[in-house]
Image (tube, rainbow, N blue to C red):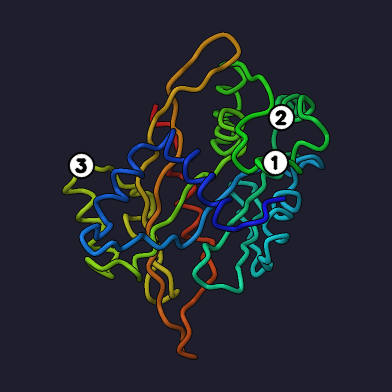
Amino acid sequence: MHSNVDTLFENLWEDYVDITPSAYKIHELLADSENGDEIVNDHVAFRTFNLPKTSLDKLAAHFLALGYEEKGDYDFEAKKLDAKHFEHPDETKPKVFISELRVQDLSEKAQKIIHHLVEQMDDDAVEADNFLYSGKHWTVSKAEYDMLLEESEYAAWLAAWGFRANHFTVSVNFLKKTQELSDVNQMLKDAGFTLNDSGGEIKGGESVYLAQSSTMADHAYVKFEAESKMIPSCFYEFAQRYKMPDGNYYTGFVAASADKIFESTNAKQ
């Protein structure tokens, strides 16, 4: 397991920007480089299948070993997902959001494809230090990807990209240029980035103590069994947190908003 939280996130970031070049450009756009201000990362999200080899708990073990604690759990009925979020006692460390697909809720055809993918993995692959940014541990055909895509965009993305950060998230509260998500969205649009407008450009708001927005995913080449194709890769998210009545900032997640954020990787046909 990783001995250092910061090293893990650095490795995750390198892997992520490699297939999400727009995230690097946005990072530069929002950072106040003159004053040496770094972007504060609100949370990082991961996707997995709820099979024994790849369960949410297996991924979470990497973070628990680094001092993270389980905080909230969420159910995404329509997308057939369960999720949990984790926080580190050091509030400057990013929160972690891990979701897993309820494979048994998919069609037999989709289940068969997913089981075949995971069967190709070593039993203990998930325990490796670099597992969280190790990509896919299987071969998948374009036809299998397309079949999964018809039923679950989440399943197709995971089959194509494997294990890596699905998105990083800018904490708007810590930006120097503005602490308003609507301003950030306008800056992004002015710079030519496409926002996810599913459920509105801003999901949530002060009433639920969390406002979120995100870009639509970049596209990058994936190597399938017999060919390479350009498909949606990862996206960048932006979160503004509000104080609760007790004076503390809300640190959880809002399922109704997250449900729409998942659609940032939708393949625009």
| Quarter of the rendering occupied by the C terminus | top left
Q: Which residue is mark 2?
A: 114
Q: Position of residue 131 (x, y in %)?
A: 67, 40
Q: Is residue 50 above or below residue 185?
A: above
| Residue type (three-letter) at the residue carrying disc 3 | Gly
| Residue type (three-letter) at the residue carrying disc 2 | Ile
Residue 119 quadrant: top right
Q: Position of residue 248 (x, y in %)?
A: 48, 85
Q: Residues within 10 Å of mark 3 (few under 14, many from 20)?
A: few
C-alpha separation, residue under disc 3 versus residue under disc 1? 34 Å
Q: Position of residue 171 (x, y in %)?
A: 39, 64
Picture disc at residue 88: none
Tell whether label 2 touches label 1 (CB within 8 Å): yes
Sequence-wise first label, 3 or 1: 1
C-alpha separation, residue under disc 1 versus residue under disc 2? 8 Å
Q: Nearest the camera: 263 or 214?
A: 214
Please tell me whether mark 1 sits on a helix, a strand or a loop.
strand
C-alpha separation, residue under disc 2 versus residue under disc 3? 36 Å
Q: Which residue is mark 3?
A: 192
Q: Nearer the viewer, mark 2 or mark 3?
A: 3
Picture disc at residue 49: 1
